[in-house]
Amino acid sequence: MAVTYTNFLTQVRNYTEVDSNVLSDTIIQDFIRSVELDVAGKVDYDDLRKYSTSTFTASNRYVSLPADSLILRSVQVIDGSTRVFLEKRDTSFISEYNSTGAQGTPKYYANWDDFTILVAPVPATALTVQINYIKDPPQFTSSNNTFLSTYQESMLLHGVLAEAFRYLKGPQDMYNLYQTKYDEEVQNFALQQMGRRRRG
C-alpha cells in the first residue's frame, strides 16, 4: 500500500529529528520534486513513457512538442499503415540538407527549442506525426500519489533524506548514508526497468 503524503512528511521529519518549523511542507515538497526529476533523468521507466499524435501542417517545417514533454525519445511519420522513424540530426545538418526548403515526406528531425522540433524535408501534406517522449513526472502531493510514492517509496524517501541532510548541513556521514542508499536504489530501479520488464 502506498504511503500517504502526510505520513511521508512525518517520516522525513522523524529521520532528520526536526519539526515543521525547520522542514516545512513547502521545503520537503521541493525535495520531493527534486528527487522525482532526478529519477526521471536517470531512469527511463515505463510510467513516464508517453506518445502523442497530431498532423504535420503542410509547408511548415516546425512541429510543437506536447506540453508535458520532458525528454524526446523518437518521432514517427504515419502514412496509412506505414510507420517510419525519423532520424535525429543537428539543426545545422537540417539547414544544409534542405537549404532550399524543398517539400516532401520528412526524413530527419532536430531539436529547435524546448517546445519545438524542426523536420526536413518540409512536410508537403498533413501526414500523421507521432511524438514518443518521456513526460514530466507527476508530483507526489497530498492529493496525488505517484508511481514512485506507490512502488518506489524507499528510493523516494532516501533521495529526500539526502536532500534534507544537505539542506540542514547535518552530519556528513548521515548525508553519505542516504545518498549512497538512494544511488543504489536508483541503479536497481534502472536495471529492473531495462531488464526484467523489457527483455524478450
Image (cartoon, rainbow, N blue to C red):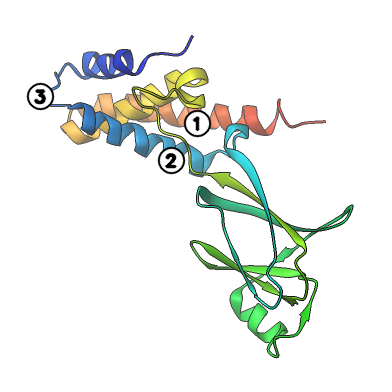
SS class, disc 3: loop
Single out the mark in the foreground, 1 or 3.
Answer: 3
Neighbours of disc 2 within 10 Å: few (<14), some (14-19), many (20+)? some
Q: Is residue 181 visible?
A: no
* Residue identifier under label 2: 38
Q: Residue furthest bottom?
A: 100
Q: Secondary structure at mark 2?
A: helix
Tell me the distance, in whole angstroms, between the alpha carbons under discs 1 and 2.
10 Å
Image side of residue 36 versus residue 101, left or right? left
Separation of residues labelled 2 and 3 (CA atoms) = 26 Å
C-beta proximity under 8 Å, tags 1 and 2: yes
Q: Are marks 2 and 3 in contact (CB under 8 Å)?
A: no
Assess disc 1: are there few (<14), some (14-19) or many (≥20) residues with their C-alpha within 10 Å of its C-alpha.
many
Q: Looking at numbered disc 2 in the image, what kind of residue is underneath it?
A: Asp
Is 150 placed above or below 84 here?
above
**Which residue is denoted by mark 1 in the rendering?**
186
The residue drawn where x is 48% and y is 38% is: 137
Q: Amino acid at mark 3?
A: Asn
At which x and y percent is residue 89? 66, 70
Hey, which quadrant is residue 100 in on the image?
Answer: bottom right
Vertical comparison of 87 with 200: above or below: below
What residue sits right under mark 3 in the picture? 21
Q: Disc 1 residue type?
A: Val
Residue situated in front as seen by the camera: 100 or 87: 100
Q: CA distance from mark 1 to mark 3?
A: 30 Å
Mark positioned earlier in the residue sequence (2 or 3): 3
Tell which circle, 1 or 2, labels the residue nearer the N-terminal end. 2
**Label whose residue precedes the other's in the sequence (1 or 3):** 3
Residue 112: give x, y in percent of width and height. Answer: 54, 70
The residue drawn where x is 46% and y is 35% is 138
Give percent across and percent down for residue 93: 66, 79
Relative side of 68 to 197, left or right: left
